[in-house]
Image (spheres, rainbow, N blue to C red):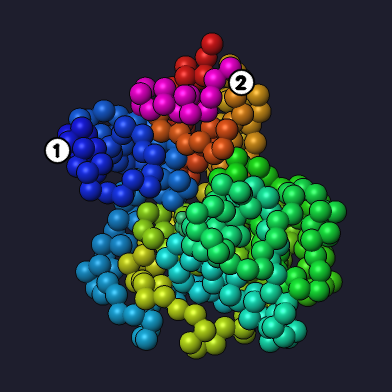
Amino acid sequence: MNTEEIMKRDAENVMGTYARYDLCLEKGNGATCYSPEGKKYIDFSSGIGVNSLGFCDKGWVEAITKQANMIQHISNLFYTYPCSKLAEMVLKRTSMQKMFFANSGAEANEGAIKTARKYSFQKYGENRYEIITLVNSFHGRTMATITATGQEDYHKYFAPFVKGFSYAKANDIDDVKSKINEKTCAIMLELVQGEGGVVPLEKDFVSNISKICKEKDIIFIVDEVQTGIGRTGTLFAYEQFSIEPDLVTLAKGLGAGLPIGGILFGKKTCDVLKPGDHGTTFGGNPITCAGGIEVLKRIDDAFLKEVSEKGAYIKDAVEKMDNVVSVTGMGMMLGIEVKNKTAKDVVKTCIENGLIPLTAKEKIRLLPPLTITYEELDEGLEILKKALSN
Ligand SMILES: *Cc1c(COP(=O)(O)O)cnc(C)c1O
């Protein structure tokens, strides 16, 4: 089947909840992929920050294939090796104490919200349940997480929304303070707002929030669904902010292409959830966890150093291109503000010429596979340069 036939069948059968580009991909290797017609593309998207090891990485394919040939699923009523091993590997590299496995970022955030509320309920009773999130944030598509998402666009059609959320301005500590009251049980934020336009938070702002949370026994939730697993040059972005969150959520890059999410619990929250409080059928699936183990094995200190170097290399190259106003972000999570052109039009031109970038709000967003080679980077940057040129 060719691209046109696949697009037609998709339009006839798949619910139209996505504004897709006219592009169908059939296979890939590293950061290079091909349409059914054999046209080549350099990938600067990682499937929205998911394919941390690129397409069909050899070690990852071997790990999941081996596991698929052993046992693919048995439910959380029983134990399997990959789930226990992956949790141990993640926790060893953080100051966190326990891990829960979910299947997506939104689901991880749901679990974190539940944990914060139970912690507060047990200690302070039923009227301390409010969660402060940031304006322009993104936390997912379930009822609680669209409510947590601080963007008006998400708060229509589906009312009533979940009670107990309020929104403070990013990088405005006085606004956060003004939203805190005796009902506040948690503050939840992304350290670099991804969907909101690759907006990094200021270090002072974040450490002030961390301090306030400690003082007032407010649970500090860091949503690392997009920033986690090496994307910003450290395993988790929070390591660069010298903070110790009470809950960290992750997803996208952890599975390298298979659906997985996770919650990490700090000292304060590691005893909150008991049998029956929370669960999910597919959580801790042996195949997805086997993929995650390979990801964690590969992302060592040398790998992380390379992520930072490649990120700086991209930033430096992009800053020199025509019509670029600014480049924001951390590591290999970058947002480009442009003038005289719209991000959408630039992305369309890039796709026509064999490069797959993303947008985030009014910016072009780059999330290349962490394993991308400098040759692939140069090839992609050349296409981006042409699309941006006067
Ligand atoms: C993508 C994303 C989510 C939602 O993840 P899903 O897997 O789509 O549910 C939540 N938070 C952040 C910061 C994200 O980037």
Is 171 situated left or right of 388 in this image? right
Residue that label 1 marks: 1
x and y percentages locating residue 239 in the rendered image: 67, 57
Relative height, residue 34 to residue 353 (above, below): below
Magenta stretch: dominant SS? helix
In the rendered structure, find residue 339 and report the number of the disc placed on it.
Answer: 2
In the rendered structure, find residue 166 and report the number of the disc placed on it.
Answer: none
Q: Residue furthest left?
A: 1
Relative height, residue 376 to residue 195 (above, below): above
Q: Mark 2: which amino acid?
A: Lys
Question: Over which residues does the magenta segment extend?
Answer: 340-354
Is 378 situated left or right of 168 in this image? left
x and y percentages locating residue 24 in the rendered image: 28, 37
Relative height, residue 111 to residue 346 (above, below): below
Q: Residue at x 28, y 68 (%)?
A: 67
Label 1 secondary element = loop
Q: Residues within 10 Å of mark 1 (few under 14, many from 20)?
A: few
Per the model, the C-alpha gap separating discs 2 and 1 is: 39 Å
Is residue 353 within the magenta segment?
yes
User: In which quadrant of the rendered view does residue 162 lie?
Assistant: bottom right
